[in-house]
Amino acid sequence: MKKIVQIVEETIEKDVSLLNGINVQLQYISNELENFLDSIVNCKGRVFVVGVGTSYFTAGRFAHLLTCSGIYSHLLEPALMLHGGSGVITREDILIFISKGGETSELVQLAEIARNLGARTFAITENKLSTLARKCDFIISLDLSGADIMEVIATGSSTTLSAFFDGICAAVVSAVGYRKEVFRLIHPGGAVGKKLRGKKTR
């Protein structure tokens, strides 16, 4: 049996390799990224982010960081959306669907509902030929293979997507000119709040 340090090191190395690979891929989808950023920044409604399983938590993290970056964003619960909750969606909104394989039935159904309601939809997926990709208006396809435990537990892929979304948030902050003074108004709590107020923390 491998020692724990070796296992952890090998896992991190795989994650780093996948992250480096994503950086290369970005060069080939610059137009898609520009459209994605422009849609988020100029959204007249709300930016909804949705996923299932591990992707649900990745979606939640992205939605929260978008809110911290000055964007009116929310995480959606797919099951609730299919039982009347999708009534919150308007034609002014954007829905961002996160699914590695692109075949999650709840997301496919919600994407169809969103399009019927006139919202703009994006699929973030590895499989650009998937059902979800075909149901959405726009696709950002990223190769996320090679880093997940046993190729099924979404470790490296979720880490990589989180890093990708970090980059999107940084681009949003740059595009809208978001300032610390504004962030200070919505984040008074904790060590970050004290730092924003100019107080020293231990």
Image (cartoon, grey):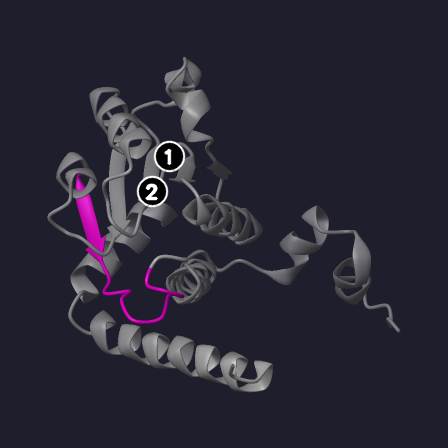
Q: Residue at x 57, y 85 (%)?
A: 3
Looking at the picture, tell me which residue is in the foreground, 15 or 73: 15
Looking at the picture, tell me which residue is in the foreground, 14 or 110: 14
* Residue 96, numbered label: 2
Vertical relation: 186 (above or below) 2: above
Residue 117 lies in the magenta stretch: no
Q: Residue at x 33, y 37 (%)?
A: 95
The residue under label 1 is which amino acid type? Lys
| Left or right for 13, reference 125 | right
* Residue 44, numbered label: 1
Crowd tier of the residue under label 1, counting other residues whose Cα lies within 10 Å: few below 14, some 14–19, many 20 or above? few
| Left or right for 182, reference 97 | right
What residue range appears in magenta? Answer: 137-151
* Residue 181: x %, y % from top left: 67, 58
Disc 2, SS: strand
Residue found at the far top of this picture: 84
Q: Residue at x 45, y 43 (%)?
A: 56
Please tell me whether mark 2 or mark 1 is closer to you in this view.
2
